[in-house]
Amino acid sequence: MEKEKTKRSFFERLTGVVNMDRAEEGDGSPLSEEAEARHESTWTEEETVGQLSVDVYQSGDYIFIKAFVAGVKPEDLDISITREMVTINGRRSEDTSISESDHYLKELYWGEFSRTVVLPVEVESDEAEASERHGLLVIKLPKIDKNKQTRLRVKAS
């Protein structure tokens, strides 16, 4: 009898969690051989792009976006900013010196990731700043003050 292969959900692939409803097969044990094989499956190039988790908050005249990018080189990050939105793209490269057969557990996400955040207010994209420390990316975006008024003096020539 041919075993049926079931593709794991994005969440299962990202976290390494196995859906126990699908895992309980055959002898009723929590992880049958087939479920264990699915649990040990690895990421491939054809998999979907991972979604970066972010925190977005405001403080005073700024909007802040924070994201964990541990293991990502700064040159592998691409941040695009408009007045209304921020897009973060990147790639986390896996250490290829370790063979697949030497892994006991493999839960970390490796590969491309992306996240687009629609901002709650317009920002000055030219004045934005990005920094990374201990794997935490912080993007600081100055808000546009639409109520700000400037008085011009007329110069006599």
Image (tube, rainbow, N blue to C red):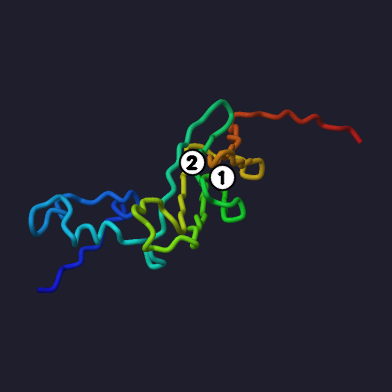
Residue 144 in the image: x percent, y percent? Answer: 59, 36
In the rendered structure, find residue 83 and report the number of the disc placed on it: 1
Instruction: Assign the N terminus to one quadrant of the image.
Output: bottom left
| Residue at position x 66%, y 41% in the image | 127
Check disc 2: other Cα within 10 Å, few if <14, some if 14-19, many if 20+.
some
Q: Is residue 25 left or right of residue 139?
A: left
Q: Is residue 50 above or below residue 128?
A: below
* Element type where label 1 sits in the image: loop
Check disc 1: other Cα within 10 Å, few if <14, some if 14-19, many if 20+.
some
* Element type where label 2 sits in the image: loop
| Residue at position x 31%, y 61% in the image | 41
Judge by depth and name the residue closer to the eye, 64 or 33. 33
| Residue at position x 20%, y 51% in the image | 19
Q: Is residue 9 above or below residue 1?
A: above
Judge by depth and name the residue closer to the eye, 146 or 143. 143
Give the residue pinned by disc 2.
Answer: 119
Q: Is residue 28 left or right of residue 66?
A: left
Pick whichever of labels 1 and 2 is earlier in the sequence: 1
